[in-house]
Image (spheres, rainbow, N blue to C red):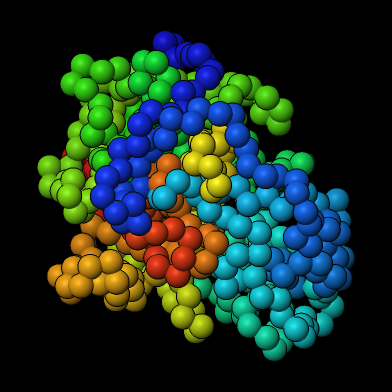
Amino acid sequence: MSVTAGPQGINFGGSSSSSGNKDITNRNNYGNGDNNKHYGNSNNGNTGNSNGNFQNGNANSGSNHCCCIPEGNSCLEEYTNNGGDDLVGQGFIDERIVNRPNAGSNSNQLQTQTCPYRNKICCYPDSYDFSVFGRTCVAPSGSGSNSGFTQGGNQNSQSGAAWRQGCSETSVYGSNQCGTRNYRGPVDNLNYGEASPGEFPWTCLLLNQNNDFIGTCAVIPEGFNNDNNVGTSKVITAAHNLKKVGFNEIVKVRVGEYDASGVNPPEKQKHEEYQVIKITKHHQFDPKRLSNDIAILRVNQRINLNHPYVNTACLPSCDNQFEHQFSNGTGVRCWVAGWGKNEFDGSFQFIQHKVDVPIVDDYKCNAALKRALNRKSAGVGDRFQLHDSEVCAGTETGKDACTGDGGSPLVCQAQSGRWTVVGLVSWGIGCATDIPGVYTKLSYFKNWINAN
């Protein structure tokens, strides 16, 4: 095989590619010249969410969510949330992925909670993925606002109500299925908002021959039949990431990456790199409007899906697979991961970060974007219309995908437990406010992706 581990270091930097009003930007990946290995303020102060024994309902933080589990099951007391006052961002617009401690409307803890007979309450950090232990989270009943969400056991719960998937999933066969991962829970000593190695095995990096960071990408199956058995050489990203790529420039795809500064604990595997041999931007991509913001990259050979940190994300089974709206008006919760910029100084982060955001229905998103654009310039919002190629997520202050990781996949966990790439980070107005972010909608491009 010609796959290489490649030179490890990534050069984060270069001149900013944004212009005009910086509050209205494509969520691209070009730095501001600061090439520091900066990880943010990770240990100053105490937000009150770092206590680690999650048992019998003794949640010590407003950022926890609670589940009812059988009395005989463990609350996983050994699991600790080693967070702190780390306000490091996570990279998508206006300089970072933002995932601040205690951010978002999901952080409100139930005041009174009860579970069914012979069940007990266990409370976990809001970012804890209960599904890796093969259990179903049943939210306790009670008063108060949201009990949070749970990705586990096909659940994405709000106040005890399970979400309903919009369609049946595409059947997949074999042991190496799309949307699965070897990840078995958070590693120790993570700062707030940091992912774990292998947690998002479909997320990849685009680099040039000098290891300069071009953007973030996603590994996908060859087509919407989601057949991993045939392997894949197909990667997708936001088309706007590629505007500075020259005609003969070498572009590489790096998979299985976690710490871009080197192979350091808790990483146990080196990344692998592939050379891009063909780039296909969508023929209707509008660089001014950023509609149809998608490109397909073909690499020089099949990607090694046996790497423990590498897999494809499933492609959507239908347009409305994750359009469920809970009674409180929020949508299904999904995740984005990347290496975007620090919230404070704009330097890129070497450790992969993650943020969870709810899907926002098109009508609400369109109205919010219109209002926001009109505040920038009267009449602009009146002329704006959300494009069919776009889907929205966000609205929780302190949680967003921001400049620094355009092209990062927005993934949602389907009822089968497999993860599906619903969108790619595209653009937004400001960052980490109540204004939803805009993502390229993958289901819209089914025929085009299958044909290329």
Give above or below for 429 relative to 226: below
Q: Nearer the viewer, residue 400 or 442?
A: 400
Residue at the (42%, 19%) spot, across then down: 211
Whether residue 236 appears in this view of the structure is no
Residue at the (21%, 16%) spot, across then down: 248
Q: Nearer the viewer, residue 173 or 214?
A: 214
Q: Which corner quadrant holds the C terminus? A: top left
User: Which residue extends farthest bottom?
Assistant: 143
Residue 413 in percent (x, y) is at 51, 57
Residue at the (71%, 53%) spot, across then down: 85
Q: Nearer the viewer, residue 214 or 359?
A: 214
Residue 218 in percent (x, y) is at 40, 39
Give above or below for 263 relative to 291: above
Q: Which corner quadrant holds the N terminus? A: top left
**Horizontal side, residue 10 vs residue 353: left or right:** left
Residue 415 in percent (x, y) is at 51, 62
Whether residue 120 appears in this view of the structure is yes
Q: Which quadrant of the view contains residue 274? A: top left
Q: Which quadrant of the view contains residue 110? A: bottom right
